[in-house]
Image (cartoon, rainbow, N blue to C red):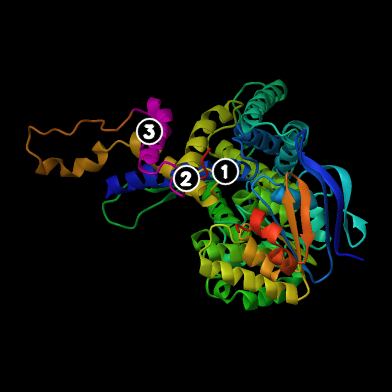
Amino acid sequence: MPLLEATGVHGGYGGMNILHGVDMTINNDEIGVIIGPNGAGKSTMLKAIFGMLNVTEGDIKLRGESIKNVAPNKLVHMGMGFVPQEKNIFPSMTVQENLEMGAYIHPSRVSAMLEQVYELFPPLKEKRRQPAGELSGGQRQMVAMGRALMVEPSLLLLDEPTAGLSPLYMNEIFTRVKDINKAGVGVLMVEQNAKQALAIADKGFVLAAGQNRYTDTGQALLNDPEVAKSFLGG
Amino acid sequence: MNELVFFINNVLISGAVAGSIYALGAVGITLVFSIMRFAHFAHADMMTFGAFMVFVFTAMFPGAGAALGIPTPILMLPIAMVITASLAIGLDKAFYKPLRDNGVKPIVLVIASLGVTLMLQGLIRMFAGTSSRSLYIGERKEIYRIDVPIEGVLRPIIITDPQIWLIAFAVIVVVALHYFLTKTRMGKAMRAMSDNADLAQVSGINTKAVIMVTWIIAGSLAAMAGTMLAMDVALQPQLSFFILLPIFAATIVGGVGQPYGAIAGGYLVGFVETLSVFNWSILLRPLAPMLPDALEIPRSLALVGTEYKIVVPFFILVVVLIWRPTGIFKGKVI
């Protein structure tokens, strides 16, 4: 049974549909990457999965159970973590408090999970007493991902985790995503840095105008001259 | 030295008393703002309501406190705090939550809270009339005169029983609030929601519970502040009218949405208020023999007359906001 299975998803904000029948399947332990031009509905799809907008048609299943239009706070209990693209930290709280908030629903697991997250992101341990709002962009992204990992999710959704980061931090984040995945967490992320993202992806989904354009393994998409020409900048 | 004692009585003690009341009120307003993003105008009326609850219970059991050696209103305060906290939750359920659920703009909630203000004021007047009452029923307000053991000092330091209770309560509240916000899970969740409500929700924080706890704290602190003010002065239905402006000034001066700012703002407003109406000529009097005859110290040398005391918070507001546009503790921009 796939970890996540979305079939024919239609949805959008208010009355306007942005998604026109998107399919997406992620198995356990897979990294899925959504790429596509601006306005293709990449982030919208992620939000539709996480119950942040109204899905009008189609279905979304987590391990066979429908999660269509289930509220985000319930999905957290079902083992899903979400890292928004912007405003993804609590700026006035310390790094450690940010992480603690991630495990709000599992207070007894806080200390064990803190250990794991600090192991994954060593810079956060050093800065654990510092307000998260004072950190650099890359470190904030680590806090945001760490917070989402604190609930021990089986599926982690990342909305453009490398947006606005320096190449150094970008590579760091991609490496960490791979590590997280190796630890047994399914990942679905939206990325602008399509080439690097597809390189680590088990599955790639190319969206355009709210529909699937290409779906294949990351490597196959990278090698596809059509995809390269239209979506990877030649 | 007599002059110094006069200063202690009229500035240090009076300022600490006014500041404590403003701080207790402002903390509630700032917490409600930080969680629900609206200025809750009915807060001062929750203070009056709390004080009236204390009055009702004190009138029912006037001798209860004497058995324990504390003023009866203090004994009744916890009951009033519970009732006022329930009122706050009830007001939220009845008036603010339906609006919130419909996703209205914050200004609609502000106007709704003005409506609640009028309603509460009407209800209090309907049941209690408009007269001024004392919370001391069959008891005497203890006034302590502490003689200063220095030769030549004739004036004692004067402090009343409710003032001592008030300052002690304020200290306890500040310490407890700090512990709650920095050490407990719910307190941290509250700060998280204040920082980023959407992220709090996607982290699985129970935002409904946070809202409820916010009203419990705001309501019970309002009852405490209202009762202490009524014990210090007198219980009047228009109490809220006099207190509303200074506590909003304290909230904004401290930085909207910042609990520590509200406390600092409360004491700042309280002390500046008392300093501005303080008669400085009394402090200068000992210098008179040293001054040339041409320089006579006037009998009254206050910055503003007592009748203009109410404008002082606005003056502080303007001065602080020019210096720090979002308040002392960098509040949330409205």
Q: Are marks 2 and 1 in contact (CB under 8 Å)?
A: yes
Looking at the image, residue B220 sits to the left or right of residue B254; the answer is: right
Query: What's the magenta bit mostly, secondary-structure-wise?
Result: helix
Asked whether residue B205 is in view, the answer is no
Residue A226's quadrant in the figure? bottom right
Q: Residue at x 48, y 39 (%)?
A: B252
Q: Chain of mark 1?
A: B
x and y, in percent, of residue A135 in the image: 50, 63
Q: Are marks 3 and 1 in contact (CB under 8 Å)?
A: no
Q: Amino acid at mark 2?
A: Gly
Q: Are marks 2 and 1 on the same chain?
A: yes
Q: Amino acid at mark 1?
A: Thr
The residue tagged with tag 1: helix, strand or loop? helix
Q: Chain of mark 3?
A: B
**C-alpha span from label 3 to label 2:** 14 Å
Against B327, residue A189 (above or below) is below
Q: Which residue is mark 2?
A: B254
x and y, in percent, of residue B152 in the image: 26, 52
Q: Earlier in the sequence, mark 2 or mark 1?
A: 1
Of the pair B93 and B311, the residue shown nearer to us: B93
* Residue A217 drawn in magenta: no
Q: Which residue is mark 3?
A: B315
Q: Earlier in the sequence, mark 3 or mark 1?
A: 1
The residue tagged with tag 2: helix, strand or loop? helix
- Magenta residues (range): B305-329
Q: Which residue is mark 1?
A: B30
Q: Are marks 3 and 2 on the same chain?
A: yes
